[in-house]
Image (cartoon, rainbow, N blue to C red):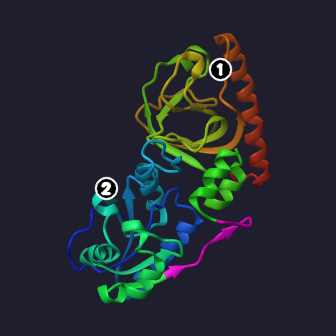
Amino acid sequence: MKLLRGLRAGTAGYVATIGGFDGIHLGHRALIARARELAAVQGMISMVLSFEPLPKEYFASDSPPARLTNFRERFRLLEQDGPDVFCLLRFNEHLRGLRAADFAALLARGGIRQIVIGHDFRAGYRGEADARWFQREGARFGLATEVVAPVTRAGLRIGSHAIRSALAAGDLALAARLLGRSYSMRGRVVSGDRLGRQFGFPTANLRLARRQAPINGIFAVRAHGPGLNAADGVASVGTRPTVGGVLPLLEVHVFDFAGDLYGRELEVEFVARLRDELHFDNVDAMIEQMHRDAAAAREALAADEQARGGSGG
């Protein structure tokens, strides 16, 4: 998959699906699959066209919504079975203020010949470039338009908002059904203050790379990456108030692992939420709880393994 930062004038001939694509959930997958199918039939190139920052982050800069996937996570998910091209547009005042015709012309100049969008798609000034506008007006810009119907699971229309709500409620099973996979976060392991090692729980620390995380608390997890094959562990997403932490961090303790993970890119799969992040009166009380968390995580992971018929790592 090729990464483009901005549309370039040319005659490449893209079939593009356009949107925020936060989470790359089953609804997004339906759009991407259709774009790939149309591109293959017509001998064109499939594209996912998205934005940084996400429009909802831009509009609510003081208090942005929780972000399901940062840029690295979106890219890695799309790499697996996504489009030929992932194109990012910088979302700013200029892009926000484009009238529908100007937005359509931007797409056409960039070599896009067909768009695949959801029924609730909106872009440009006051969202006037919506699905109905493109169905009505797209042809005069050389843009064929296909609108994909909503995808539903568990009686819900699949969307990033529904997944955020499930994660905020600690319902990882529902989030997984809407995503089509377990919720995970990805990042490179960075050097920390090594407090976990002092407490008998060495951790791999990953920066969240987002202003607002969709989850918080203590979790049973599986870690994937170089040297780890769905390794069981326990993780914390939060600020570590007992030891004076301020910045949100993902800390992962991998069970029965003594190697060095610094600098490696890990994907952390969240299997079960165990509890809220707590402030303890002293470090000894915190360490006692960490042992209870580790035991609870092992139980949750064993139960998950059994429920899946032993198919996991």
Task: Categorize mark 1 by other alpha carbons within 10 Å: few (<14), some (14-19), many (20+).
Answer: some
**Which residue lies at the image location 45% right of the left edge and 70% below the top edge?**
122
Q: Does the rendering let one see residue 253?
A: yes
Q: Quadrant of the N terminus?
A: bottom left
Find the magenta span and give its range: 147-157
Q: How far apart are marks 1 and 2 (CA)?
A: 40 Å
Q: What residue type is labelled 2?
A: Asn
Which residue was labeled with disc 2?
92
**Label 1 residue SS:** loop
Along the viewing direction, whichever of 102 and 88 lies nearer the viewer: 102
**Which residue lies at the image location 75% right of the left edge and 29% below the top edge?**
295
**Label 2 residue SS:** loop
Spot occupied by residue 191 in the image (x, y as percentages of width and height): 42, 26
Q: Horizontal placement of 113 versus 79: left or right?
A: left
Q: Does the rendering let one see residue 5?
A: no
Among all residues in the image, which is located at the extreme front?
A: 126
Residue 52 in which image quadrant: bottom left
**Which residue lies at the image location 64% right of the left edge and 12% below the top edge?**
283
Residue 111 in which image quadrant: bottom left
Along the viewing direction, whichever of 137 and 46 lies nearer the viewer: 137
Vertical relation: 58 (above or below) 177: above
Vertical relation: 201 (above or below) 172: above
Q: Residue 230 carries which label?
A: none
Spot occupied by residue 195 in the image (x, y as percentages of width and height): 53, 17
**Which residue lies at the image location 68% right of the left edge and 60% below the top edge?**
177
Q: Horizontal placement of 87 versus 194: left or right?
A: left
Which residue was labeled with disc 1?
279
Q: What residue type is labelled 1?
A: His
Q: Earlier in the sequence, mark 1 or mark 2?
A: 2
